[in-house]
Amino acid sequence: MITENYTISFLGLDPLYYSATILGNIWNIAADKVYEETGIRISGRIQENYIVGQDEEELNNTIIFTVESSRVPDEVATEDEYWDAYRDVIEEVRRRLGNPRMDLIIKKEDMYHFRKI
């Protein structure tokens, strides 16, 4: 089945202050608010990486948090409804993080589920 995958990266966060747990709490607050308003749950998986060797001094030795979310078409709202809810979540998260730089990748992928037998 074709799914839509959203990968948002928050760049340049201070590794002495931010952690995956803190970002997860911020994401949950924003996602819960959107869920209450729309009935659409925006969940995700968080990965934490460090930026090194950058020409741009302000990004050197900072954290990148990447949150991956997926919309399975037969399980969740329409593409437009999901996008609107997703955008509301990431805008709130970004605001709470102090408006860091962000990268967003959206792609469609063929995904298969194999149930336990």
Image: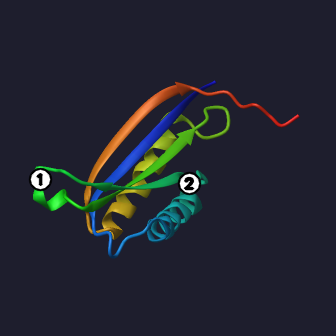
Residue 30 location (% of width, % of height): 47, 64
Residue 72 location (% of width, % of height): 61, 35
Residue at 35 percent across and 50 percent down: it is: 9
Residue corresponding to mark 2: 38
Quadrant in the picture for residue 117: top right
In the picture shown, does residue 61 fall above or below 84?
below
* Element type where label 2 sits in the image: helix
Q: CA distance from mark 2 to mark 1?
A: 40 Å
* Drawn side of residue 58 relative to residue 95, left or right: left
Comparing 36 with 116, the one in front is: 116
Comparing 58 with 72, the one in front is: 58
Residue at 28 percent across and 69 percent down: it is: 14
In the picture shown, does residue 84 fall above or below 20?
above
Q: Which kind of residue does numbered mark 1 sit on? A: Glu
* Element type where label 1 sits in the image: loop
Residue corresponding to mark 1: 56
Residue 23 location (% of width, % of height): 44, 66
